[in-house]
Amino acid sequence: MGNSISLAGYTFVVEESKEISGEDLGLLQEKLLQLNWGVQHPASGPMRLKLWVDGDEVVKVDPDIGYVLRLLEKLVEYRTWINAVVNVERACFMDDFGTMAGYSIAAEKIAGVEVPKKADYVRTILCEGGRIVSHLIGLGSFVGVMGVHTPMQWALIAREKFLDAFEVYSGQRIATASIIPGGVRYEPTGKFIEKMISAVDFLEKEFIPRYAEVFIDNPTLKLRSQGIGVVPKEKAVELGLAGPALRASGVASDVRKDYPYAAYGELDFKVVTKEEGDAYARYLVLWEELIESAKIIRQAIEGLPEGEWRTKFPIKVPPGEAYVNVEWARGCFGFHLISDGGTGPYRLKMRAPSFANVWALPEIMKNVKLADVPVIFASLYMCHGDIDR
Amino acid sequence: MEAKEALKIPFEATKKVLRVTKALFAPKATEIWWDKGIKRELHYRGKHIINAELCIGCSMCARACPVNCIDMVPTGVKKPRAVPKVRANECIFCGLCEDACPTKPEKAIKLTDHYSMILEDVTWDRLTEYVFEPENLEEALEKAKKMEELLEKKKQEALKKKQQAQQAKAEAKKEQPSPEKESNPQKGSKGEE
Ligand code: SF4
Ligand code: SF4
């Protein structure tokens, strides 16, 4: 058994294993067991964690990714400026608006196109809708990995209302392809606004009180997730965590606040932070951001200006490059877009937050119990589509 | 105790039977939807409809398609030179072709709210054969042909006129210009019509 580990190319530093093994170093490798947590694990999604366990304790973690690689960055090079959004939005289907908005802003920066104010507001509404949809799934799956599947069903009911609103707006529920360079594709009709308001109403009046009553201050949940996978503030910055995971460690980093894009500069909202940095704090950050997002949507709908929602985007864009960050549901999403003067992007590099979080796993999961692995994994709020791209 | 529990069994059994019979007559939670003609919301992105009469054959739609699933089929007439054909099993229903189409006020290629695309005996060959084609292609072609003939006629007439005018000029040059003779050929050409 020890041989199989070394055959696979993994060797252990003797000093590191000393504290776990006790005295007999020769027997150590016999005691370690390599587990494949994932690909088929209900909590893992399409990725694998190679875990080496000593009894119940995790000694080493090695994430193995690449199961949903779709070469999105390469595919964008074969697209025109407008239709590249269908590849960008497929980074993760939960919140497809954030990625489309980021790409569009980058393209507009290179082309020197100014979008109308109405487009900015519609983008904000859609992005926050996407964030809510994504956070709902995040909350549901976090409790889901502990074996309770009711919250997921509740979250899906609330999510359905938002998907209905997206369908009225763009004609599609998930892959909407609705934000493009130069504005947004469709006019925000009265019916869309109506649906969006009713979805937010349902979220605020039905979902939030009911969910808060059962699954937020829940003693069992706390027992299971408090003090687990703690990342202190300095460590979080050092590891390069992103999004809710970073804010749960006490770093008030939010692109919406720090470098406002779309209409975020004109709206009033607060950045949710928590000091504890454990799995439960990350869960609470998701929860409170959900409430914030609902408020932002209300404000943006109230302030929705009149006018055009789309301007002309040139077919050929002058050479240049732009780097744009957006606060996506799962964290800061960076787009480095380069134009060589052609009809489409020359190169697009996406900096994905989940990819940053997945490489923090080996640090966070050192010496935790095997049963805590899914809890930490789900609390980091990662998306596999976004890890692999 | 045991006797009591034994007495309970038929009671429980009847309860269960009652529950099942109740469920049998309850309204169904799911339904068959595809033949109901359910109207989808505004902008629903379903099956394409291509109007060959409106199409000008500019192939903007084929260029806008992110998955290159639109083929331009040559028609043999001059306008439209080619009409789009959508390979349905590759289409991702993004609707960008509709956005790109320049015809006004109605787009020549449109995504309708027709969502049932049921194919029987699905094999790979049949899937690749599944395409959305222009529905009124033949009529449009006939119209286009007639239009072309008309144009051709007009062109030839114009040509004839020109030739006759030239001939008349040449003749006029030969036999000293006089106002009466110059007006004659024009009258003659009108008579030919
Ligand atoms: S709707 Fe289909 S045919 Fe039209 S652009 Fe999108 S993928 Fe191409
Ligand atoms: S359908 Fe529209 S875009 Fe496509 S060739 Fe015809 S006129 Fe051009």
Image (cartoon, rainbow, N blue to C red):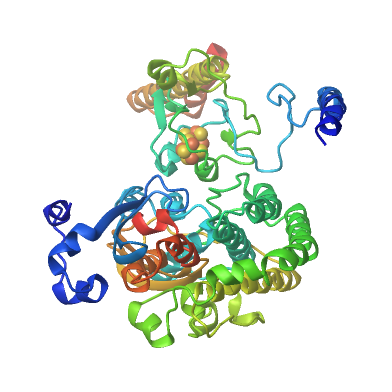
Q: Position of residue B193 (x, y in %)?
A: 55, 14
Q: Is residue A213 above or below residue B192?
A: below
Q: Which of B115 and A280 lies nearest the eye of the viewer?
A: A280
Q: Which of B97 and A244 lies nearest the eye of the viewer?
A: A244
Q: Quadrant of residue A383?
A: bottom left
Q: Position of residue A265 (x, y in %)?
A: 59, 81
- Quadrant of the rendering where the C terminus of chain A is positioned: bottom left
Horizontal side of residue A96 vs A306, given as left or right = left
Q: Is residue A367 above or below residue A148?
A: below
Horizontal side of residue A119 vs A191, given as left or right = left
Horizontal side of residue A17 vs B135, given as left or right = left
Residue under the point 40% across and 24% down: B73
Give the total of numbered labels.
0
Q: Position of residue A331 (x, y in %)?
A: 47, 70
Residue under the point 51% across and 17% down: B141
- Residue A117 visible? The answer is no
